[in-house]
Amino acid sequence: MTPAPAGVLDVLVLGSGVAGLSAAVRLAAPLTGPDPGLRVGVLTKAELSQSATRWAQGGVAAALGGDEDSTDLHLADTLAAGAGLCDPEAVRVLVDEGPGRVHELIALGAVFDRQPGGALDLAREGGHSTARVVHAGGAATGAEVERALVDATRASAAAVLEGWFAVDLLTDGGRCAGVVALDAAGRTVEVRARHTVLATGGAGQLFAVTTNPPEATGDGVAMALRAGVPVADIEFMQFHPTALHHPAMPRPLLSEALRGHGALLRDARGERFVDELAPRDVVSRAMAGRMQEQGADSLWLDATGLDDFGARFPTIAASLAAIGLDPAGDWLPIAPAAHYLSGGVLTDLWGATALPGLWAAGETACTGVHGANRLASNSLLEGMVFGARLSECILAGGDAPTATGVLAPVLRGETVAAGPPTHRAGPTDGAVPEVAPPDVAKARDLLQRTLTDGAGVVRSAGSLARAGQALAAVAAEVGSGPPPDRATGELANLVTVAAGLLQAADRREETRGAHARSDFPDPSPAWRCRIVLDRAGASLSPAGGPSGGVPREGA
C-alpha cells in the first residue's frame, strides 16, 4: 500500500484524466522557466491510467488547419452548440490556447493520426463547420492522450496514490486544506495540501445506460456541494446519440467521426430523419422522439458506405467484430446514452473556485465553455487548456478566485438563495448516529433507473417529481454519516449530485441544449441564465447567457 505523503503537499490533484494530469505534469515539472516545480501528489480511486479520458473515442478539436479554419470559426461553432449559455470570454480562451496545448501534448509524446504527407489528419464531427478534430488510432484518442500524460506524471509527481478514494474536502481558516480520504486499505487518512485540484470527471453513472466507466460518480461535484462551493449547469447532462445498443456497460461508443465520414442515421423503417452532423442534443432528441413514435428501443447507424472502415477505425471495428457485427454489411443498433456533464463546480478563467485553495478543471468543472450542450471533441481540449491555466496561475502565486468568467456574478453576490440544505456531515462535524449499512448495489441500481426514467433525454415536471420521490428513499437508506467504504461513498455522491440535477432540471422550465422538457418544449429568454447550487440549495444566478437576466417565477 502506498503511504500518505509526509507533510503538506504543494498541490494535491484529485483524478487522473486529461485535466488533472495536464495540471500535475506542469506543476511538478514546468515546461518553461527555471522553476524546478512543486511537490505534487495525484490521488485517484483506480489505477493512474483508468479514467474517463482513456475511454474517449472522439478527438481533440482545435484550429490547426490553417486557412480553412480559424479560432473565430471554432468559437462560433462552440457558442452555437452551447445554446446561449456559453461564456464567450471562456470560449475565447479555449479556442485561442487550444492549438498550443495540442502541440505541447505532441511534444510530450502523444502520437496523432497523420496524412501520407505528414500533416495532421483532421476530421469533421457534429456541430463543427469544418474539419478540425485530431484523432489517434482512428477512435482511440483518449487512450493515447492518457498514455502520454501518465508516463509524464509518473516521471515527475512526488506521490501517486492509486486506489485511494477522496471522501470530503478539508477546510481550515476559510480555505481548502486538502481532503479526507480512504486509502487503498480502507483506512481514513487526511491528505493535506496548500492547493487542491478537483479533476474527478463526470457523473454518467447517475444513469442506467451510459458511456462512462464505473468510476464516473460525480465525486468532485458532490464534495463541492457538501463544502458549500457553488456548482452550476448540472441539469445539462449530454446524451451521446450513437452508443451501441448492447448489454455491455459502459456502452460502446460509435464515434462522432463515423458520421463525419458519411455514416447515416436511420429509423426503424430504414428512413433518414435528422441531419447527422447536427449538435448532439438535436440528434439525441430527434432519436428519442422517433423511438417513442415507432415503439422502438433502438435505431440504426448505417456505415456500410464507408471505405476502409477497419483501417480507419480499428478500435471500433474490433469491438463490433467481438459481438458479431460487420459494419460493411450490417446496420449498427444505436440508442442515446448518458455521456457528459456539461456543468460542474464554478470556476473563474484560471480554474479557481469560490473557495480559496480549491481549483477545478475538466468535466467536474463549469468553466462556461460548454453552456447548455458541449460541442463534440471540446472536452479533451477543455481539460488540456484549463488544467494548464490553473497550473500556470498556481506557479505564479495565485491563491484566490478572480471576478472573471462564470464565477464573477457569484463572487459579487448576485444570487438568490432557495431550497433545502444538501450537506452531509463530515468527519469533523461531530458524532454521527449509526445506521444499518445499505445494500449498495441494489440502491445504486434503483438510483440509476430512477434518473433514466425521470431525467433522461426528455423530462417533465411529473417525471422529475417521481424521480425525486424515489431518490428520497435511496438517500434515506444511505444515511448522512461518513461512508465506511468506497462503494458507499460513491453511492452517497451519486445521491448528492442526483438531487442537485433534479432540482435544477425542475427549476429550468424550458428546453435548451441538453435539457429538454416535454411540458416546456421551447427555449425561453427568461431562462438564459445559470442555475447555481450551493450547500444552501439552489440559487438563481444571472451569470449565464449574455442577456444576464434573472428568471421570473413561472417563466
Image (spheres, rainbow, N blue to C red):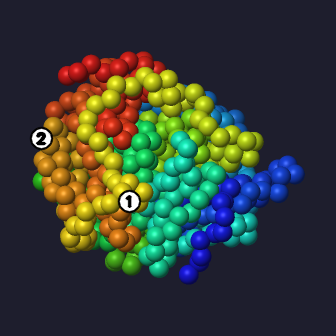
**Percent of width and height locating residue 384:** 62, 50
Please, is residue 143 above or below residue 352 in the view?
below
The structure residue drawn at horizontal position 31% and vertical position 46%, both measured from the top left corner, is 422
Residue furthest toward the front? 431
> Residue 313: x and y, percent?
51, 65
Name which of mark 1 and mark 2 comes first in the sequence: 1
Query: In the figure, is residue 262 to the left or right of 95?
Result: left
Q: Amino acid at mark 1?
A: Thr
User: Would you place residue 190 above or below residue 411 in this image?
Assistant: below
Q: Mark 2 sits on what residue?
A: 462
Q: Which residue is mark 1?
A: 217
Residue in the image at 49% along x and 45% along y: 365
Amino acid carrying mark 2 in the image? Gly
Q: Quadrant of residue 173?
A: top right
Q: Is residue 94 visible?
A: no
State the quadrant of the C terminus: top left
Q: Secondary structure at mark 2?
A: helix
Q: CA distance from mark 1 to mark 2?
A: 25 Å
Which residue is pictured at 39% across the width and 30% down the height? 530
Is 451 located above or below residue 1 in the figure? above
- Seen at 61% across and 37% down, the residue is 400
Q: Residues within 10 Å of mark 2 (few under 14, many from 20)?
A: few
Total numbered labels placed on residues in the image: 2
User: Would you call the spot at circle 1 few (<14 residues within 10 Å), some (14-19), or many (20 or more)?
Assistant: many
Of 475 and 144, which appears nearest the observer?
475
User: Camera-side residue: 479 or 443?
Assistant: 479
